[in-house]
Image (cartoon, rainbow, N blue to C red):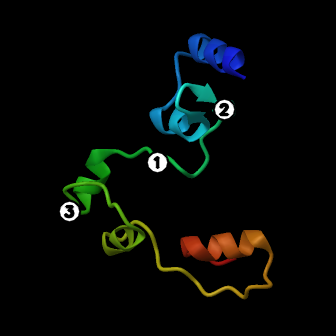
Amino acid sequence: MSDLCEWKAKDQGGYYEQSEAAVRDGKRWLALPYGIVGNQMAYRKSLFASVGATQPPKTLEEWRKIGVFPAAIAVPDDAPLLHRLLGLTGRQP
């Protein structure tokens, strides 16, 4: 695994720090950090400044306070997974 991970890092210019930390145990590679899904977020400081935030929100509640992330919508537990995920984002399924 290490050979593949080191080659890919060199070929692609490295990994995001968080991605690499998630798949390494010290010097040992446990998996290939290949994608970023949901655990990292990119943002523009100017967008937060436009709503009066001096720094990016650190919690879901802070996101909701500045109006960027709507309140969750109640969705039944037996609803399809996509509907439950949309409910967490505040979107109607």
Name the front one of labels 1 and 3. 1
Q: Which residue is mark 2?
A: 34
Q: Quadrant of residue 50?
A: bottom left
Q: Secondary structure at mark 3?
A: loop
Give the mark, 1 or 3, whose residue is nearer the N terminus.
1
Residues at marks 3 and 2 touching, judged by CB atoms closer than 8 Å: no
In the picture, measured across the screen, residue 29 lies left or right of residue 78, that is left
Name the amino acid type tagged 1: Met
Give the mark, 2 or 1, whose residue is nearer the N terminus.
2
Between residue 59 and residue 91, name the one nearer to us.
59
Classed neighbour count for the residue bearing mark 1: other residues with Cα under 10 Å, few (<14), some (14–19), many (≥20): few
Please report the residue visible at 49 percent of the width from the left and 31 percent of the height from the top.
16
Q: Which residue is mark 3?
A: 52
Residue 71 in the image: state x and y as whole percent: 47, 79
Give the mark, 3 or 2, whose residue is nearer the N terminus.
2
Instruction: Say which quadrant the C terminus sits in.
Output: bottom right
Whether 23 is drawn above or below 15: the answer is: below
Q: CA separation, marks 1 and 3? A: 19 Å
Question: Can residue 72 be seen from the camera position used here?
Answer: yes
Please report the residue visible at 39 percent of the width from the left and 66 percent of the height from the top.
68
Residues at marks 2 and 1 touching, judged by CB atoms closer than 8 Å: no
Between residue 81 and residue 5, name the one nearer to us.
5
Instruction: Say which quadrant the N terminus sits in.
Output: top right
Name the amino acid type tagged 2: Tyr
Residue 29 in the image: state x and y as whole percent: 63, 28
